Image (cartoon, helix red, strand yellow):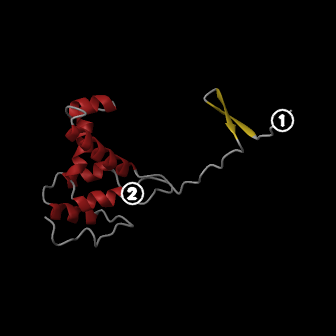
Amino acid sequence: MTTVVRTIHITRKARRKRVVLGPEAPKPELPGRVPRVARLMALAIKYDRLLRKGVVADLSELAHLCQVTQPRMTQIMNLLHLAPDIQEAILHLPAVERGHDPIHERSLRQITAKVAWREQRRLWARLGLPHSDQRSLQQPGRH
C-alpha cells in the first residue's frame, strides 16, 4: 500500500468551497492601483482596434456592449485625440498608493477638445502632475 502525503488548503469564496493543492499561496503585495484614466486610455486604444477591425460596427454598438451610454463612450474615445506623447504619459502614470487619482478624465476633456498638439501639451503641462516627464512632452518636431 502506498501512502501519499500532501498539504491542501481549502478556501471559501462566495459560499463556494475550493480545494487548492499545496500550501496557501502568499498573496502578492501590489504597490498600488492603476489610475482610472490610464485604464480608460488603454480601453480607448483597445476599442479603436475593435472598430478598425470591424468586430463592432460603431460606437453605439460598442457602448451597448460595454453597458455605458453613447455619450460616455464618446468621452472615452476622445482620449485618442490627445497627442501620442500625452497618451503615453497617461498610460505610464505611477500607481496610486492611497487616496484619489492625481488626474481624472474630466480634467482632460478641455485638452482633447484642442486640435493642435502644441496647445494640448501646454495645457497638459499646466496640470502639473508629479512624475511626468515634461522633457518628452515638449518635442519640437511635433504638431
Residue at 72% in and 38% down:
9
The reply to whether the C-beta atoms of the residues labelled 2 and 1 are less than 8 Å apart is no
Q: Is residue 4 left or right of residue 55?
A: right
Residue 132, x across and y down, in percent: 35, 66
Q: Is residue 27 left or right of residue 48?
A: right
Residue 41, x across and y down, in percent: 31, 49
Residue at 28% in and 52% down:
107
Q: Which mark is residue 70?
A: none
Q: Is residue 65 left or right of residue 7?
A: left
> Looking at this view, is 134 or 58 the one in front?
58
Task: Name the amino acid, label 2.
Answer: Pro
Task: Name the amino acid, label 1.
Answer: Thr
Q: What residue would you read off at disc 1?
A: 2
Residue 123, x across and y down, in percent: 22, 62
Residue at 27% in and 66% down:
125
Q: Which mark is residue 102?
A: 2
Around disc 2, counting alpha carbons within 10 Å, would you say few (fewer than 14), some (14 to 19), or many (20 or more)?
Answer: some
Q: Quadrant of the C terminus?
A: bottom left
- Residue 31 vs 52, above or below: the answer is below
Mark 2 or 1, closer to the camera: 1
Residue 109, x across and y down, in percent: 23, 50
> Looking at this view, is 116 or 80 the one in front?
80
- Which residue lies most toward the front here? 1
Query: How far apart in space, not on screen, are marks 2 and 1 (Cα)?
Result: 60 Å
Residue at 84% in and 35% down:
2
Total of numbered circles in the picture?
A: 2
Q: Quadrant of the N terminus?
A: top right
Around disc 1, counting alpha carbons within 10 Å, would you say few (fewer than 14), some (14 to 19), or many (20 or more)?
Answer: few
- Residue 71 vs 92, above or below: the answer is above
- Which residue lies most toward the right here? 1
